Image: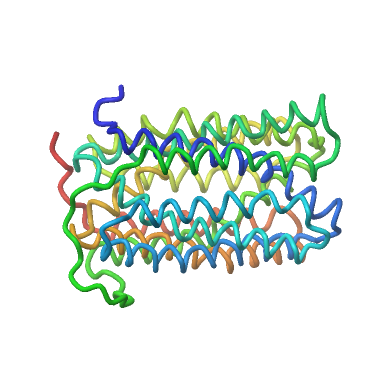
Amino acid sequence: MFKGITGNVLILGLVSFFTDVSSEMIYPLLPLFLTGVLGAGPVFLGAIEGVAESTASFLKLVSGIVSDRVHSRKGLVLSGYAISSLMRPLIGSAGTPLAVLLIRTGDRVGKGIRTSPRDALIADSVEPSMRGKAYGFHRSMDHAGALVGPLIATFLLAYFISDLRQLFWLAGIPGIAAVLLIIWKVRETRRVLQPGRRLRLTALPAGPLRRYLLILFLFTLGNSSDAFLLLKAGALGTPAYRLPLLWAFFHLVKMLATMPFGALSDRIGRRSVIVAGWCVYAVSYLGFGLAGSEVEIWLLFALYGIFFGLTEGVEKAFVADLAREAEVGAAFGWFHFAVGAGALPASLLFGSIWQLEGGAAPFLFGASLSAVAAILLVTVVKVPSPPRH
């Protein structure tokens, strides 16, 4: 089962596990904290997520390019995780929605610095024929942390504390564990360096990789923050104490689905699996738009988790397949930039449509864009030969 999972991939998976334990102790309760405690509305919630993720997306591009030109990808990975681990618990001290915006953006600055170098380091650490499995494993560990985090939050809120702010401060502990793991266990790998040390914003890659990233950007315009799904669950009567459980269930599905579908893409090709995932997304968002009960929400979160299993690791493996060897970091930078650049307009548009037209319309919009993106991916992106085992 773990053939091809190298030491770096294993440790980086554990790092993501602890980081997501920290993050997901906070994230499923953040919409409730913003709207119920600080008085923010849906549009501001969309602005927080959109601004934070768009900031991260630009830094992912820069850090990816930098990582191709320096010997130490590990240094960038370490600094990014350290910044996030320091910023994230500060939400416990926030007194206004604007303060949450600034802290959340600081957290995403750390994510922007670490993500592309980390993904490139994973590509450096495995054989091309095992990339789907490696990225699937990494995302599975990430989701395992996202499963454990809400369970810890639920347990603490049920039996020990009643103040969300105290919970947010405690979320800093697993983040520290992630940073220590990077310091002690992550190793550099030998690779081809991009010539020149001067930082230069490389052009969007040409050929199939460019077409893929442009289509991915289109898909992202219909893929708003998952905070809106939690808001939808609350609107249909899901009580606050069950929101972390719903979020944990969602990540359980993602954890179980990501590695098998990543390995499947090693055998049948990336594009087919991604297209299947985008179609599942369209169906799940259509369902969220029409849902009328909490039971339906739980079923739709399961389907939505399968979408992540089909796409998260596979989309990254597809980038590594299409990128030139000396530009893997830059390719991942552009990948994350394409996703993040669509985050701000996607979340703002989603929140605006929700506020103007009600809860169903924005989900129908997202389902339509994902269907269009799936059709384009099939018709305009040439599929490279599957890597051989």
Q: Nearer the viewer, residue 183 or 90?
A: 183
Quadrant where the image shows the N terminus: top left
Question: What residue appears at the point 56 percent right and 61 percent down from the top-left corner?
Answer: 53
Residue lying at the far top of the rendered structure: 1
**248 lies left or right of 6:** right
From the top left corner, tell me how far across and down residue 340 is, in percent.
Answer: 49, 63
Question: What residue appears at the point 82 percent right and 62 percent down from the top-left corner?
Answer: 96
From the top left corner, tell me how far across and down residue 163 is, in percent.
Answer: 84, 40
Residue 219: tell me if it is visible: yes
From the top left corner, tell me how far across and down residue 71 is, in percent.
Answer: 26, 58
Q: Nearer the viewer, residue 263 or 288?
A: 263
Q: Nearer the viewer, residue 10 or 274?
A: 10
Question: What residue appears at the point 19 percent right and 62 percent down from the top-left corner?
Answer: 193
Q: How is the image coloured?
A: rainbow
Q: Nearer the viewer, residue 388 or 71?
A: 71
Question: What residue appears at the point 43 percent right and 54 percent down from the top-left corner?
Answer: 115
Quadrant in which residue 65 is drawn: bottom left
